Image (cartoon, helix red, strand yellow):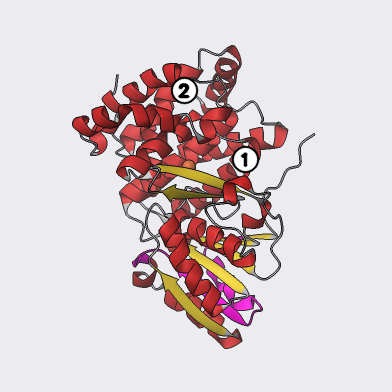
């Protein structure tokens, strides 16, 4: 039996969907965002204007690209002081993920980073309504029950999962993505493709997640080049929706070792999550294809999408400017050689546990090396 959850209470989508903020009821709203991009393109100003007739609004900004425990602690202090009943995370997956962890510790003060992995986590928030408004099309954090936080001391990224983290309302407004630089559109779009393909090759999938993943893969193959190279409004909205669809799929069926390996590299070198996934994905597919079930599923996917899927992934990566190996992503060879053992150990954590072929440090090591050196 499967208990599927695809979204929170509502999913609002389409150009101009941000205006839905004007219909929310609240007393104190905290807007959480990352760097300055949402200020520069006027989104935060628009959100404040939509919200302020209905209650008190405060903005908190400054979440890192790979949100750390310190980012969460800093924002949590603001949240505890301001005591919001509405939290709106606007920005990339980092801002939404950081807001999720803040909300967990805000609603349940006995939880913290020391005990969160050893505690039975609560399922339902009661103090706050949580709205997620993504400005990138990759993580699908707007519909998932997952937050990924960087633990600097351990040099790794770990996921916290509980239903209490799933946003109540997801707003997919492609207008927010129009100022997204091409390389960010490429990396985040390849992250979404990785979610969909890892889900499609995960043995836990069933009919619904299989079709959501397949739909997302087809849609991303069709629309990502236009989103990156021409940045048309239609392509940016489509990528928003297909990325979200991939999230609905993977948050129910799981991922695989692409994410396990990429989290280790991102935690060591701050490599952008989508970039690392994009580089690692074809190496993992080549490896996993030795499994007969994976091979049959990839063949079925190839027939659906009109060509060998692994070749299509490599061609799409090349078209949108993704390097073919991690050595070409700014990671010096001396650093890789120094860190190799801890990278391999880190790659065994997280989603590697649900890879369709069970992995060991010995079997994952050649894949880590191949993804780094490109052979
Ligand atoms: Fe991802």
Does the magenta-highlighted stretch encompass residue 22?
Answer: yes
Residue 313 in sight from this viewpoint: no
Q: Nearer the viewer, residue 354 or 213?
A: 354
Q: Residue furthest right?
A: 1
Q: CA distance from mark 2 to mark 1?
A: 18 Å
Q: Quadrant of residue 362?
A: top left
Residue 249: mark in rendering: 1
Query: Would residue 95 be visible to someone looking at this image?
Result: yes
Q: Residue at horizontal 48%, vertical 65%? A: 90
37 w.r.t. 94: above or below? below
Asked which quadrant contains residue 264, the reply is top left
* Residue beneath disc 2: 285
Q: Which mark is residue 147?
A: none
Report the magenta residues as a range: 12-37
Residue at (29% x, 29% y) in the render: 325
* Residue found farthest to the bottom: 53
Q: Residues within 10 Å of mark 2 (few under 14, many from 20)?
A: many
Please rate how many residues cluster around mark 1, counting C-alpha atoms within 10 Å: few if below 14, some from 14 to 19, many from 20: many
Viewport quadrant of the C terminus? top left
Residue 15 image point, x, y percent: 52, 63
Secondary structure at numbered mark 2: helix
Asked if residue 172 is among those painted magenta in the image, a careful observer would answer: no
Q: Quadrant of residue 191?
A: top left
Q: Secondary structure at mark 1?
A: helix
């Amino acid at each position: 039996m499967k208990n599927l959850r695809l979204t929170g209470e509502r999913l609002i989508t389409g150009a101009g969907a941000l205006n839905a903020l004007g219909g929310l009821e609240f007393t104190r709203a905290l807007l959480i965002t990352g760097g300055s991009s949402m200020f520069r393109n006027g989104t935060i100003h628009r959100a404040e204007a939509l919200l302020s007739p209905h209650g008190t609004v405060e903005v908190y900004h400054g979440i890192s690209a790979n949100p750390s425990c310190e980012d969460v602690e800093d924002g949590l202090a603001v949240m505890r002081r301001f005591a919001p009943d509405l939290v709106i995370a606007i920005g990339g997956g980092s801002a939404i993920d950081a807001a999720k962890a803040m909300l967990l510790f805000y609603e349940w003060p006995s939880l913290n980073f020391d005990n969160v992995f050893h505690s039975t986590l609560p399922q339902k928030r009661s103090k706050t309504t949580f709205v997620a408004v993504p400005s990138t099309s990759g993580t699908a954090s707007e519909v998932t029950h997952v937050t990924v936080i960087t633990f600097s001391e351990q040099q790794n990224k770990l996921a916290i999962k509980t239903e209490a983290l799933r946003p109540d309302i997801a707003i997919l407004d492609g207008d927010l993505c129009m100022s997204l630089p091409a390389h960010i559109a490429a990396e985040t779009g390849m992250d979404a493709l990785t979610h969909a393909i890892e889900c499609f090759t995960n043995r836990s999938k069933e009919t619904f997640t299989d079709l959501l993943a397949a739909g997302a893969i087809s849609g991303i193959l069709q629309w990502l080049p236009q989103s990156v190279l021409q940045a048309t409004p239609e392509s940016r909205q489509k990528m928003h929706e297909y990325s979200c669809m991939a999230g609905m799929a993977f948050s129910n069926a799981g991922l695989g070792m692409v994410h396990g390996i990429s989290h280790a590299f991102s935690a060591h070198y701050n490599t952008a999550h989508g970039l690392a996934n994009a580089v690692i994905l074809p190496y993992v597919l080549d490896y996993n294809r030795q499994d007969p079930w994976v091979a049959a599923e990839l063949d079925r996917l190839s027939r659906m999408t009109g060509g060998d899927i692994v070749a299509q992934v490599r061609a799409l990566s090349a078209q949108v400017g993704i390097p073919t190996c991690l050595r070409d992503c700014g990671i010096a060879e001396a650093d890789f050689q120094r860190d190799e053992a801890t990278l391999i150990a880190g790659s065994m954590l997280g989603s590697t546990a649900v890879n369709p072929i069970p992995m060991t440090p010995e079997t994952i090591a050649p894949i880590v090396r191949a993804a780094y050196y490109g052979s």
